[in-house]
Amino acid sequence: MRGRLSIDLGALARNYRTIQNMVGENCTAAAVVKADGYGLGVAAVAKALKGAGAQDFFVANLDEAAALRGILGEGPVIYTLNGFDARGAHVYQSEQIIPVLNSLEDVQDFGAHGQDLPAPALHIDTGMNRLGIRMDRLDALQGHDFSLVMSHFACADEKDHSMNAAQFEVFQAAAKHFPRTKKSLANSSGAFRSNAYHFDMVRPGMCLYGLNPKPETENPMEAVVSLSVPILQIRDTAPGETCGYNATYRFKNKTRLAVVALGYADGFLRSLSNGGVLYWQGIPCPVRGRVSMDLTIVDLSAVAERALPTPGGMMEVIGMHQSADDLARDAGTIGYEILTSLGARHLRRYID
Amino acid sequence: MRGRLSIDLGALARNYRTIQNMVGENCTAAAVVKADGYGLGVAAVAKALKGAGAQDFFVANLDEAAALRGILGEGPVIYTLNGFDARGAHVYQSEQIIPVLNSLEDVQDFGAHGQDLPAPALHIDTGMNRLGIRMDRLDALQGHDFSLVMSHFACADEKDHSMNAAQFEVFQAAAKHFPRTKKSLANSSGAFRSNAYHFDMVRPGMCLYGLNPKPETENPMEAVVSLSVPILQIRDTAPGETCGYNATYRFKNKTRLAVVALGYADGFLRSLSNGGVLYWQGIPCPVRGRVSMDLTIVDLSAVAERALPTPGGMMEVIGMHQSADDLARDAGTIGYEILTSLGARHLRRYID
């Protein structure tokens, strides 16, 4: 008995078109499919996005890019965000991959090894201090040709964070150095914050997969992922007993529990111990004790006697009553980490 | 440029033999290889353990068991911990898998569907309230035949926890109901706590993979896993700048940073944000800001100017200076979750 992970490729495609419609015909909606399509399976995800009209794809590294070329075939533009890997120069060439250059060293490496490659992209750091060339180095790039100039928001999920406007201003100043080059600034949240952030291309990731790009409001995206897991055992505790590793939860009363086939090895983060919730037919059942590798214990006290599940019944982890964002909040993290952790043991089903 | 994950199968085999030698020839050391061999790749791990002498293997469910039979071939005994799945009765038969029955319902299901199967194992709950039949139900099992009677410690990693002795006592009482059946109680930590806990079989998991079964002392096991990741970029911040998503770290001084190809999608848990440490040639470099999906930023301030790394240099995540247990402590979790989260993007190398 395994968990069932459903991935709604129809919803994914509609989410893509929502973004493309929002940014209009003078702006391209690219698709970010790194980390195995945010954990959902890059082959199915990338094909569905291509079918929805995506022609530009971003991944983290060259291995992901080469795999994606095999999935998509010729045509779509594929970018690697993590810079230029000189040892793989022949792969950029053979697979027609465009590196995003992040530093002067990257630009020099590309100059030395990338003569036969199409013009690369350039990432300018506008304040995140992660990847990207600093503004004060731009003068050193005179005479280099780029197909795309981009940057990345650090705080776009926070509606009123001062860095959003500050990064936009810095990016506008940088853009003046590259008057004829395509520009891209916005990730999922950035694309929703202001039309001024759209430029020539937006690069949505999380919102395609149904996570909420505007956490302060209702989610404008369709849900893509649902996960339910089977109950292995129903059991009753006696008052005063504990459950799970290290006996971290003690029952005051006789309590009916369900033990489900779901653990941190399945992406149900251990930080959900004594904090997460699963749903039985819409009724929240709190996690009791520690989440273990393959098993989680939930409390059925809120379920009426006549509605109690039996072994084999499927409990909702992500679905109608609980989003990946909800689960993330209880785990002290973000929906992205929930998706990329979902693990390999669930039975995956792709719905069109 | 990818991370390099090394798995030392020689150390794994020696860890197995350490346990087998410790428990002596009248006790069997089984091997727990669920969740893809604790995330390290069950094919390589299970073959190495078989080569070291293991003849009894435990996995979580029937899918894992069937895959393991394909890996190991005929001979070794394979148990599923998560009960009996009646819909797969023919698979238990064809692959010669022994289910561990956890409840009266399991016993009844097995009775109805398992006529042609070898005698199953029985899990008695001795206080963990997770899987296993309660003591007050044992009378209902009269006349049933079992090949193994087992239970599981909840708190064996805590040396002096009162539940260890309490569970042992309950298990001894349960054992009297099955005078001629093999018995097993101890997991990794339990095997180290008392020779009295060994019975006929111990079931080590975590300690085989190099995690510390006795957290209060130096680790008696050999390290199995090491992980290093490439630096993508070296950068300098200006005083007052922040880094990473949501600008959670602010630099007082000009600071040299390394941005590495490692994120939560690679198993570097997001809870290590502003809390974890990577090592450059033995020097600890603290994580600054949030861990992102594919990238982490660390502070090189402690590294002398002449010893500074360059892009492409490999930083230690798990190795000589930092164990998976160390990393887990900084992440607020246990080494098990680190191992099972390691992800698929690292280049894996198995060392003999």
Image: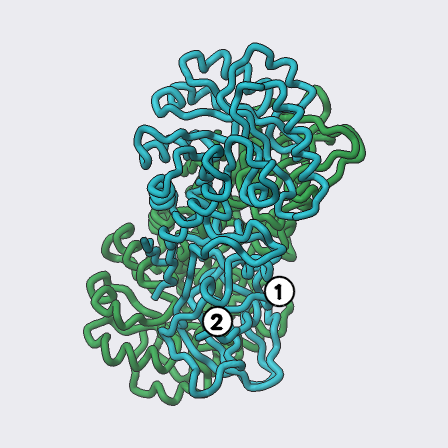
Chain colours: A green, B cyan
Number of marks drawn: 2
Which circle marks residue B279 in the picture? Answer: 2
Q: Is residue B155 above or below residue A180?
A: above
Within the image, what quadrant is residue B98 found in?
Answer: top left
**In the image: residue A17, left or right of residue A159:** left
Image point 67% across, 41% down: which residue? A289
Question: Quarter of the image containing the N terminus of chain B?
Answer: bottom left
User: Element type at marker 2?
Assistant: strand
Image point 28% across, 50% down: which residue? A71
The chain that hosts pointer 2 is B
Q: Is label 1 in contact with label 2 (beta carbons under 8 Å)?
A: no
Type of amino acid at the residue the image marks with label 2: Tyr
Sort mark 2 into few (<14), some (14-19) or many (20+) by Cα contacts within 10 Å. Answer: many
The chain that hosts pointer 1 is A
Image point 75% across, 39% down: which residue? A250
Camera-side residue: B157 or B271? Answer: B157
Per the model, the C-alpha gap separating discs 1 and 2 is 32 Å
Q: Is residue B10 above or below residue B54?
A: below
Camera-side residue: B311 or A198? Answer: B311
Image coordinates of residue B146 in percent, x first then y, are 51, 19
Type of amino acid at the residue the image marks with label 1: Glu
Which circle marks residue A107 in the picture? Answer: none
Q: Is residue B170 above or below residue B233?
A: above
Q: Is residue A7 visible?
A: no
Q: Is residue B44 visible?
A: yes
Image coordinates of residue A222 in percent, x first then y, are 52, 46
User: Element type at marker 1?
Assistant: loop
Image coordinates of residue A104 in percent, x first then y, are 36, 82
Sort mark 1 into few (<14), some (14-19) or many (20+) by Cα contacts within 10 Å. Answer: some
Which circle marks residue A158 in the picture? Answer: 1
